[in-house]
Image (cartoon, grey):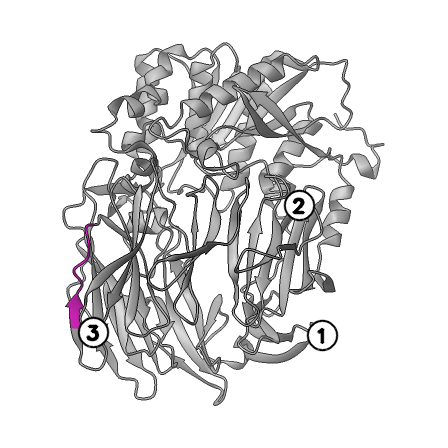
Amino acid sequence: MLSLAVNAQEKQVTLEEIWGGEFRGEYMDALHSMKDGEHYSVLDFDRETRSSSVNKYSYKTLEKTASLVDSKNITDIAYFTDYTFSSDETKLLLATDVTPIFRHSTVGKYFIYDTKTKTTTLLSDKKIQEPTFSPDGTKVAYVFENNIYFKELSSGKETQVTTDGKKNEIINGVTDWVYEEEFAFVRAFEWNATGTKIAYIRFDEKDVPEFSMDVYGTKLYQTQTVFKYPKAGEKNAEVSLHIYDVTSNKKSAITLPEYYYIPRIEWTNDANVLSTQLLNRHQNNLNLVFINATDLSAKTVLTDTDNAYIDVTDNLTFLNNNSFIWTSEKDGYNHIYHYSKTGKLINQVTKGNWEVTNYYGFNEKKGIVYYQSVENGSVNRDVYAIKINGKEKKRLSSKTGTNNATFSKSFSYYINTFSNSTTPNEFTLNSSKTGKVIKNIKDNKNLQTKVAGYAFAPKEFSTINVNGNDLNMWMIKPINFDITKKYPVFMYQYSGPGSQQVANKWNSANDYWFQMLAQQGYITVCIDGRGTGLKGRDFKKVTQKELGKYEVEDQIAAAKKLGNRSYVDADRIGIFGWSYGGFMSSNCLFQGADTFKMAIAVAPVTSWRFYDTVYTERYMQTPQENASGYDNNSPMSHVDKLKGKFLLIHGSADDNVHVQNTVRMVEALIQADKQFEWMIYPDKNHGIYGGNTRLHLYKKMTNFIKDNL
């Protein structure tokens, strides 16, 4: 029991505090750099009045210079949750009554607020998707029930662009489930520079197999959610590219070079030239294609290939002369390249045995590229400037940890977000020329003071040499750690391709949980094994066609190595993970039966045969081509080896990793006569949250650890 005499610095953290928002930090929401380069706007929400406003701030002074719109002054809107400007910034689209569909997609009611006339107009009385201003701000295009529409704001006239949209059959202008989840975009239409044409992707998903989920709700009979979900090796939607001419009301289908996926479309600065990225099914050949919108001819200007796969990014940037910036791993690390408008390489802008992790933009006046990278160690991120010719590189950020920048339109300033394992998020205004802090905007000193009152131990960063590689690791020891004692170890990992868990940044909610476990006498450890990111192409892509092989070998070997340390009780090592991490923790417990005493798997993939085409085939090819890769590394193939204690958890309405994964695992365990525990959270998705759910989940996991480790 905790003594009443415990001083403030020894305060114990509780799950109720963690999931009740006690450690929630301050952020800057919906930050938008304004056109003049001297101001930025932020979405502010007043909790007392439950109203929203978009406020304009000066970069120089950080003072609020104007309230652009406030829902308190609009009778039709109680509050709004997001906003976008027209290109001249005289109009704002305000999002209200927004309902999620899947991870990124939503439907909502949208209002247009005119800053000149102070008038508010409902865009559509229907709940619509992805409303987007035309470049001149006179029209807004959007999607309703799988069809594209646009509205002329002056007259209110609505034009329906496509008419064949139908649920679970044809989609125009927004993506299907698998594109949304794995290519990470929803809006699949784009205005050209003059607002005279709309390019869009059409999805024909009639032949894609359907997946159904029971939703139990509170009524007498359950309902079903039925949606198209292509599992590995199955048929995907047939995608085609189209251009609609606003003036003539004519739609044209584009004949493209051979392709399977269209993961990106973007107009160049030339209103008559559309770019598209095309991928083959294996995703190891990506073509950048330019389309002439007049004669509809298509020309491949760049091809990127890899023996494993190509990552699709949003880094393509067209400069004023239509030359373009591109990122690629072709030299073994992710770097920035500059190409002419015909696709001829002008030069490689960044070079080195390190990864570019974000491309921020290009200052055309000064010829400077801004980016984020891990040059200062793969657990840290810094902001850099470099001339487009690859010279005069300058590190702009000064503090070691995780730095992220949001640049002004003029590239004179940037707002830097910094944190590390001991410092919560700090927001500062910085000079883009020198990187020096001009002013502090917002910090989380109150959170830092609050955290200092708890018995929290430092997160110790190091490496551990496993299977010939120095793997990044962090460790949290009990605050009163005694090297002469032996402690149980609880390992956390995710391990998915290109991911990173060992990063020098401020706490996530899980970190507070790990501190709680440390207070209760557990050492918590996280190790990024082979297949994870930011250590070069070869380290990341070694897992190709064998997801779960090398990653499992590394976690088991690391656990054994930790078990050899004098202060570790080698008989009390457990492992935990969620999603890909649940796939891993299951495999580690089964295949490392003599190493791990227990495991918790939340929302795990249990066979890649059950997961979607785009993600799975990127790393595994199809089951028809690589059956052994799928089956040999499936935890269901190793259930007979189970010795330790196993807790399996899933949400019944997980549209991403279907509960089918857990049900099939349960059946395999039953038939192998293995005892285990499992928990289904009714109607919860992949995140397993809502109401008391997260608190219940973490109580269950904490109790399982206490009872079995």
**Residue at point 62%, 21% (across, down):** 489
The x and y percentages for residue 64 are: 66, 76
The nearer-to-camera label among 3 and 1 is 3
Write down the residue under mark 1: 61
Q: Which residues are magenta?
A: 251-258
What is the quadrant of the C terminus in the image?
top right
Q: Left or right: 463 with respect to 224?
A: right
Dot 1 or dot 2: first in sequence order is 1
Nearest to the observer: residue 23 or residue 223? 23
Dot 3 or dot 1: first in sequence order is 1
Q: Left or right: 31 with respect to 421?
A: left
Q: How many marks?
A: 3
Q: Kindly state the secondary structure of the residue where label 1 is placed.
A: loop
Nearest to the observer: residue 681 or residue 347? 347
The x and y percentages for residue 680 are: 40, 32
Q: Marks 1 and 2, how far apart in space?
A: 27 Å
Residue 445 drawn above or below residue 697: below
Residue type highlighted by circle 2: Gly
Q: Left or right: 694 with respect to 631?
A: right
Nearest to the observer: residue 478 or residue 471? 471
Q: Kindly state the secondary structure of the residue where label 2 is placed.
A: loop
Residue type highlighted by circle 1: Thr
Residue 294 image label: 3
Q: Kindly state the secondary structure of the residue where label 3 is placed.
A: loop
Residue type highlighted by circle 3: Thr
Write down the residue under mark 2: 401
Residue 617 drawn above or below residue 708: below
Residue 204 drawn above or below residue 440: above
